[in-house]
Image (spheres, helix red, strand yellow):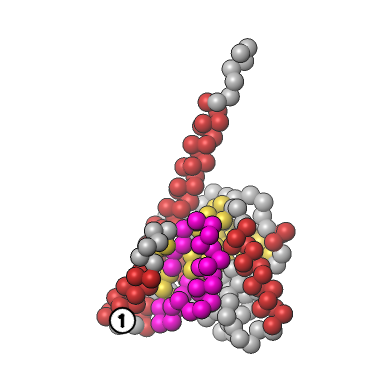
Amino acid sequence: MSLFQGLQFLTTVNDLKALPADGMEVAFAGRSNAGKSSAINTLANHTRLAFVSKTPGRTQHINYFQFGNANNRLVDLPGYGYAEVPVSVRQHWERLLSQYLVRRSNLIGLVLIMDSRRPLTELDRQMLDWFRPTGKPIHCILTKCDKLNRQEQTAILRKVEAEFADESMITVQLFSSSKKLGVDIAEKVVGGWFDAMNYQASQAEASSEHSEPIDGE
């Protein structure tokens, strides 16, 4: 079974105070119309799980999905960069996104969705700048790669990888929702994050048990 098989909607929030208190989560962020919802649906092998709109900017809340054990969460963040959204709404999104990315302790990694034909826009870089100081891993998914020929795919992948050559916590891949290309790579990377955190948690629990005082000492 694939990592995200059985992905189920959990809750939606528009205020950081309403975020779930427990669980480990990986956030998916991306510019409006970069293919974020389609990528989530493809990874979950579900056609209508995450909302796909022909009007970018419609997803205005933080949407939570759970999979595997109930503590594994995928978080669909509001799309950004849509000019026709009212200024007040856009400012709210920016505050919500920046505070969530910087302060959320449950967050173990960020998946940044970028259109392979237009990667690393100014807003994409802003997302990276918000999240980098946390020291947590970032995986860049370059969507819609089926719109490029093989030579163009290779060139854009190398270009983005070169951008992060000195940052080992940032990885990059090509992806196509329509062709279901790159699903295995994304699952391996994100699954590795959850595995690493689960291992750390089990080690910490074992260490705590061994350090407990023996009765009578």
119 and 65: which is toward the camera: 119
Whether 81 is among the magenta residues is no
Mark 1 residue element: helix
x 52%, y 67%: residue: 129
Question: Can you name the residue that lies furthest to the bottom here?
Answer: 84
Judged left or right of residue 92, residue 23 is left
Judged left or right of residue 144, residue 48 is right
Question: Can you name the residue that lies furthest to the top here?
Answer: 216
Look at the image and tell me in which quarter the N terminus lies: bottom left
The percent position of residue 202, horizontal first and vertical second, equals 50, 38
Can residue 7 be seen by looking at this rendering?
no
The percent position of residue 198, horizontal first and vertical second, equals 49, 45
Numbered range of the magenta stretch: 113-140
Q: Where on the picture, by quarter, is residue 60?
A: bottom right
The percent position of residue 217, horizontal first and vertical second, equals 61, 13
Judged left or right of residue 183, residue 202 is right
Whether 138 is among the magenta residues is yes
The crowd level at tag 1 (other Cα within 10 Å; few <14, some 14-19, many 20+) is: some
Residue holding disc 1:
152
x 40%, y 82%: residue: 117
Look at label 1 and name its amino acid: Glu
The percent position of residue 27, horizontal first and vertical second, equals 54, 62
x 54%, y 70%: residue: 127
Q: How many marks?
A: 1
Can residue 151 be seen by looking at this rendering?
yes
Judged left or right of residue 27, residue 140 is left
* Position of 9 relative to 122 (above/below): above
Q: Where on the picture, by quarter, is residue 62?
A: bottom right
